[in-house]
Structures are given as C-alpha cells and as structure tokens.
Amino acid sequence: MSVQSLIFEFEETVCISPSNISSALSRLMPEIERIQDARAHQYTTPYAAINVPFDNHMFAQVQELIKEKEALRPTMLVVIAIGGSHLGTRAIQEAVAGVLYNTRTPSIAVYYAQTIDPDELSDLMDMVKAELQKNHAVIINVISKSGTTLETVINFELFLSILKEYAPQHYRKYVVVTTQEDSPLWQYGKKEHFSCLAIPHQVGGRYSVFTPVGLFPLGLLGIDIHALRAGAQQAVRASSDTHTVDNQAALSAVIIYLSASQKYTIHDMFLFSVDLAAVGQWYRQLMAESLGKKHTVTGALVETGITPTVSIGTVDLHSVAQLYLAGPRDKLTTFVTVQTYNTVLTVPSTLALLREAGVAQKALSQVMHAFCQGVQASYKADNRPFMTYALPEKSAYYVGEFLQLKMIEMMYLGYLFQINPFDQPQVELYKKETRKILRDE
Ligand code: PA5
C-alpha cells in the first residue's frame, strides 16, 4: 500500500454508488498503466509533466542559478508571466509564505506583472524604480513557454528598460529568462547574454510549475524547493498506483467525471484558508483549459467541459453559500482544509457575545474547523455532493503533492472525456483576432 499524506474523503458524500465508481476505475485502468509507463519516457511522452519532479539535471541548474542571483543580494523579484507560466508559482508562494508575505518585510519581496493594465503596471514600475534608487538589486524573471505572449513581452520590455536606465552597464545580470529553447525569447535572451532556463517542449504551461517556471522564483524566495519536489514525486508515485483504492488522482477524476454525467457540471473548489486562494485559481485554469474542448464522437460535435469556481471559507459563506445550499443541483464541491495552521491564536473572552457563542478561549483553528464541518454537514443533509482533501499543513511538501496530484487527475479526466487535456486550440482564436485588431488600428 502506498503512503498517502493528504487525507481524501468522499465515500459518504458523493452522489455516486461504489459500484459505479469501481467500474469507472476499471475503465480508467489502461490510462493508469500508460501513466506508469510514461515514467520511463522522460520528455518524449505527452505525459511529460509527471517526470519533471524527477529531473535532477534541471533541478541542479536551477539551484546553481539561484545561488548566482542570491549573491547579488536582491531585495525584490518581479515575475513577468501570465496564465500557466504564472499561476502555479503564485499558488505555491502564497500557500507556503502567506498572502501577506511582502508586508512582513522579507529580505526579498515578490511582485507579479501579469496583465497590461496601465495603472497597476505604472504603480509596480514606480516601486521598482524606488528600489533601484536606493541602490538595491531587483531581479526580473520573464517566463513564457512560447516566448511570444503579447502581455508578457510588453511587460518584459517595460521592466527591462527600467533596469537599463538604472544600471546601463550591469543590467544583464539581473535578468532571468525562462522559456522553451529556440523560442524568440530564448534567442533574444541568448543574444543579450541573459541567464536562460529552459522549459521542456512537451510540458505545457499549466503543467509546468515544477520546471524552472516555478522552481527558480520560488527557490530565490527561500521556499523549500527540495520539499516541494519531494511532495510532487510522492504524488506521481501514488497517482500511478494501479491499486486504485489508494489512487486519489484516479478516484477524484472518476468522481468528477461521473458527477458531470449526472449534470453536476460546475466544480467548486472551496478552500478553508485565505493563503490557498491562489491554489484555487491555479486549479481553475488547469480544469478550464484542459477540459473545455470541442470534439467529435461518432461523427457528432460534442462540446465538453466543467465550469470551475473557487470559494474561500469562511469569506464566501457570506456571499455564495445561499446559492450553493438552495440553488440548482449542478455543483460538485471539493473542500480543501488545513489540519494545522501555522499560527495558534485564541479567541478573546471579554465580550459576552463570544462567551455566549461558546467560542471564547477556543483556538481560532478550532472555530475555523467547526465552520467547515458545519458547512459540510449542511451539504450532506441536503444531498449536495462533495469530496474533501485535508492538507496536514501548508508546507512546500504537501502543497507540491496536492498540485501534482491535481495535474494527474486532469490527465485522467482527459481520458474519461476522450479529449486532449494538454492543448488549448480555441485560445489561439482570440489571440489571432486581437493581433488583427492591433495591426489594423
Ligand atoms: O496553460 C497554458 O498553456 C496557458 O495558460 C499559457 O501558460 C499562457 O497562455 C501563457 O503562455 P506562455 O507561457 O507561452 O507565455
């Protein structure tokens, strides 16, 4: 039996019978075996993302570059990336280091330039200039698999021009380019003598967080990337287990798939930790881009997909819970909880209101768990289907394990829906239209 560190529960709370689950698992078996087999094929398989956490050469290269850039004593890191090149890094950074990380005045702060909102960018550019005026070092890490994403390339030029202005002789050493070899960005980076890190060709953006895409910025911020990758490795081992009662990725894929066939076509990830909100955003993209596909089944066009939503406990109990508990029965929920929070805080007892509510002197984590259990009990009482994952803590190991497990879950869902979970052909449509508009204007 494999060792599972995330606690996964679903038996009593999903809308599917054990026999349906086990027959869908049998149908999935050839794909589980294919994933197992893909372990031997490094990057020459569409499932290449499962082999990333085992790539020692890549890991060593990243570590070496982290050391080199640490020696510059940077006080700020600007990550310029969007979509799959951005979301995983942010998810891990916020989960492990906290959403308020920058306000704790760490030795190196991190900011993200995703889109091209001029107001947000101008504020961020001012912050970078202020840092450089103090003679502090700022690293910019541009990340784009294709090396052609318009928003990323625009932002890169904007921030690069600031570095050039403040360090005309030395700006090159503050730039790290992460892209696939031979992309236009790679060629530019090499020509300019920037440090370049390669993203393997076969690993798509939303599956790339354990490549240099995530490893370099996270490692530079001091996040334990050894533990991160150990967690991801554990998820690969467990998720390719043909003994399916222990295979959480296969089980959750089957539950999502069978629920969708019963019209539960919305999937809500309900995370009971503010620091995990970006994990929800990462999963939203992973599910939406991987499963939202047009394909043909016996000659007929089928439009497939599950609409992913993200809710945060207890915040969204005060916004969407009414809908979830009374509205259409079209949602399957995955609750994500944290067993041990980083901090122990106790509810004060001065106010009578708190004493009467029975919360005075209780640990805040206990109150949080009570809310989560209360919500789950009301879902259960009204037959609203859900699964739960409990992370023992928000450490790099468990967050790495969870993200890798969800990537493999998505591969299994691709097989069950008979679609390719690795491409995003329709995304190209709007890119083409936008370029046309910009050229014609
Ligand atoms: O998951 C994906 O493939 C996309 O979301 C991409 O990551 C996103 O479009 C950004 O692309 P790139 O990394 O090429 O800049």
Image (cartoon, helix red, strand yellow):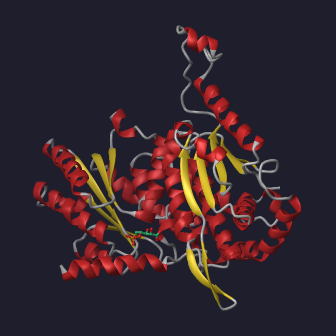
The quadrant holding residue 180 is bottom left
* Residue sitting at the far bottom: 299
Q: Nearer the viewer, residue 91 or 135?
A: 91
| Ligand 1 rendered quadrant | bottom left
Q: Quadrant of the N terminus?
A: bottom right
Q: Quadrant of the C terminus?
A: bottom left
The total number of labels drawn is: 0
Q: Nearer the viewer, residue 248 or 176?
A: 248
Residue occupying the point 63% across, 12% down: 356
Q: Nearer the viewer, residue 280 or 325?
A: 325
Relative placement, left or right, of 340 versus 15 is left
**x, y (%) of residue 424?**
49, 76
Is residue 230 visible in the rendered structure shown here? no
**x, y (%) of residue 438?**
23, 77
Relative placement, left or right, of 4 versus 209 is right
Q: Nearer the viewer, residue 117 or 331?
A: 331
The quadrant holding residue 258 is bottom right
Relative placement, left or right, of 30 versus 59 is right
Residue occupying the point 43% across, 75% down: 427
Relative placement, left or right, of 261 versus 422 is right
The quadrant holding residue 417 is bottom right
* Residue sitting at the far front: 327
**x, y (%) of residue 127?**
21, 46
Up-down: is 202 above or below 314?
below
Residue occupying the point 30% across, 76% down: 434
* Residue sitting at the far right: 19
Is residue 305 visible in the rendered structure shown here? yes
**x, y (%) of residue 363?**
61, 22
